Amino acid sequence: MSHDKFTFKCFEVHQDRCAMKVGTDSVLLGAWLDIPPSGTILDIGTGTGILPLMVAQRDETVQITAIEIDKQAALQAQENIERSMWRSRIEVVHADFTQVAASLNKKYDCIISNPPYFQQSLLSPDEARTVARHTTALSFDSIFSLSREIVTAGGRLSLVIPANLYNEVNHTAMLYGWGATRLTHVRTTTRKQPKRVLCEWQRNYFSACTEDTITIHVPSGEYSEQYIALTRNFYLHF
């Protein structure tokens, strides 16, 4: 398979002009998140457009807005969506979320993002990759503060983040009135600690949060039944 194209069961993702390529994080989030029936979804930092395509495949009724700050990535996301069978339900907007959030003319039932999170790593000399991977352009503070203004009553926000950032990120969420509703800890093997957390928050939610763990690989190196069950509708080899 070409590095410039990733083929799923129902769609293709071309990625030669995107700084961040298709990865396990986005696939996990797209397969895991709860989709509101007949709802509206906003994807912040869509990149290749993989999350809107996965969501559109999973639900035949949702309408999706995908925001992307990088022009080339936005153009490629648009092209990927135009090649799909769901082009009429996904809109790509080339914009900076922090600048256009207040001007969005509708409320969303669900906001999703595979956000930049390498806050303390060295900046890449590739500007596009730096913007895609660091919180210099989009902070968690911005995500939670701006999202609360454009989410419907009972609306939710779903992210995939590094496990070691969860406490910090959840603290920020609570400052803006978001309560965690569901967490799935992701570990690569049973011998390792979780590296990622799939997180869902809801506005003004202060009840119990459900938690579980998914392991990607069994000790032999093959994919676990958990991971296969979650992603089998997307990957060609499952």
Image (cartoon, helix red, strand yellow):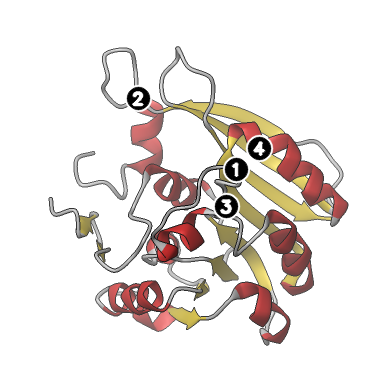
Q: Position of residue 83 (x, y in %)?
A: 24, 76
Q: Earlier in the sequence, mark 3 or mark 4?
A: 3
Asked where in the image residue 170 lies, by quadrant, the reply is top right
Q: Position of residue 70 (x, y in %)?
A: 45, 73
| Circle 1 Cα neighbour tier, 10 Å, few/some/many (<14 / 14–19 / ≥20) | few
Find out whether the residues at labels 4 and 1 contact each other: C-beta distance under 8 Å: no
| Residue under the image location 52 percent in, 30 percent down | 195
Q: Which residue is mark 2?
A: 224
Residue 189 visible in the snapshot: yes
Q: Is residue 34 left or right of residue 229?
A: right
Find out whether the residues at labels 3 and 4 contact each other: C-beta distance under 8 Å: no
Mark 4–mark 1 distance (CA, rounded to whole Å) = 11 Å
Residue 34, numbered label: 3
| Residue under the image location 59 percent in, 64 percent down | 137
87 above or below 187?
A: below
Q: Secondary structure at mark 2?
A: loop
Residue 153 visible in the snapshot: no
> For the residue marked with disc 4, what is the amino acid?
Leu
Q: Earlier in the sequence, mark 2 or mark 1?
A: 1
> For the residue marked with disc 3, what is the amino acid?
Asp
> For the residue marked with disc 2, what is the amino acid?
Ser
